[in-house]
Image (cartoon, rainbow, N blue to C red):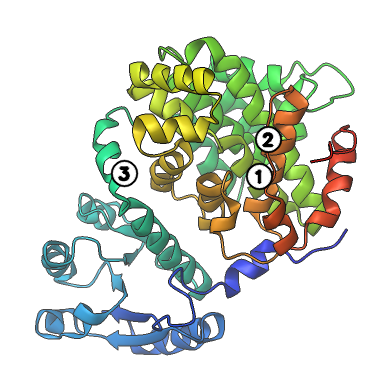
Amino acid sequence: MSMPDPAVKQAARKSPTEGADATPWRVLFVGADPLWFGQIKRDVGCLHPDWLCLLLKDVGAAPKNEEWRSADALVVEGAAAGARVWLETVKKDRPHSNCLIRCDLSDKPVVDGWKGLGYTMVPSTSDASMLASGLLRNARLLEWMADPAIKRLLPLIHKLPATPRLFVQVNEELRSPNCSLDTVAHLIRQDPVMSAKMLQLVNSAFFASAREVTDMLDAAMILGSERIKSLILLAGVFSQYSEAEGISPSIAALLAHSILVGIYSRAIALGATKNAETAEAAFTAGVLHDIGKIVLAGNMPKRYLEVKALRDSKELSDQAAELEVFGATHTQVGACLLAAWGLPLAILEALAWHHEPERSSEKNFSLLAAVHVANALAHETEGTPSQLNQEFLEKTGLAAFLPVWRQMFGLGEAASA
């Protein structure tokens, strides 16, 4: 089974506003070196021919220049004198601007100087693909956050999922040029709860280990760096809300379902693309796909109990019951909140639309497709009803592969409609 690699497709993806009558994006680079800008402009033009890149090299002239008012997105040099003062004005005038701040993320004074403004900081070494991905991600998030239901709901969520400290430590070690799995294992051992959870997971039927694993280093070698990070994120968030009324009785089931969807998503993506990086991204999207459920329950337990009661009494889906109670679904909430962790757009879209894949403009295999199929088949494995979007599978040319995926997970022929 061979399909296009989503990582390649992502680089060629156009703006979320793309359509027959879409206006080309105007991206204004402020304070950039002209030589660097010339190269980036050419590279962005190859990735997105419909984008118009413009340069305003003097930040001091920005307040009197009207170009920024008509720009769809801004890329600003974080170390440029006066940039912070000017962007504070931009924030007041256009509070929902799509803006990236280029800076040396290892320069703490510069990074600290940009905190509190709410704009996304990216490494000064970012290439055209990274900058374009960041702008596309911001645009999608601004679109989601503009939903009236989300606007009303998010202020009620006071307990936000924090990035687990262990995840930050492990991520820094894995990024190090002298990365050592020994060090990663040592860091995990310092957290007895997480260490026990990781060993429990690697010894579970999910990972089909040939022998019992008792050492954290062995577990790290079996799981691999990306799955380690994803599982730390998952377990870290669940631990923050583990006492939530209304969800605590089913916390183990929800955690098991999340891991199963991650494993199914990874297997589907690996078989479809033969690309290990894409498969690990699918695993991350899969294990995090239902994070919104626990965030809603942890912040509004009584209303979440209403969702469960409504679902059971009217035989509704989780999403339909959530819409009645909250006006929004766990998928929307999870994607909006986890965007703060800097997850790639493809993963966020998989979280946001795994029950509504038709909202995507994708016409081929994607992380969204992997999670949508994996979630449906995982529910079937667990004996609960689910529904695949057959029209989406037909549109993306994936319907023919469904029997292969069902066989992969030990499921029989699909029941006739």
Q: Residues within 10 Å of mark 3 (few under 14, many from 20)?
A: some
Q: Nearer the viewer, mark 3 or mark 1?
A: 3
349 lies left or right of 245? right
Which residue has dot 1 on it?
Answer: 371
Q: Is residue 161 visible?
A: no
Residue contact at pointers 2 and 1, CB within 8 angstroms: yes
Counting residues from the start of the chain, the first of labels 2 and 3 encountered is: 3
Name above or below for residue 220 compared with residue 283.
Answer: above
Real-space Cα separation, disc 2 to disc 3, in angstroms = 28 Å
Q: Residues within 10 Å of mark 1 (few under 14, many from 20)?
A: many
Residue picked out by circle 3: 149
At label 2, the amino acid type is Val
Residue 44: percent from left, percent from top: 49, 81
| Mark 2 crowd level (few <14, some 14–19, many ≥20, 10 Å Cα) | many
Disc assigned to residue 33? none
> SS class of the residue under badge 3?
helix
Q: Nearest the camera: 344 or 110?
A: 344
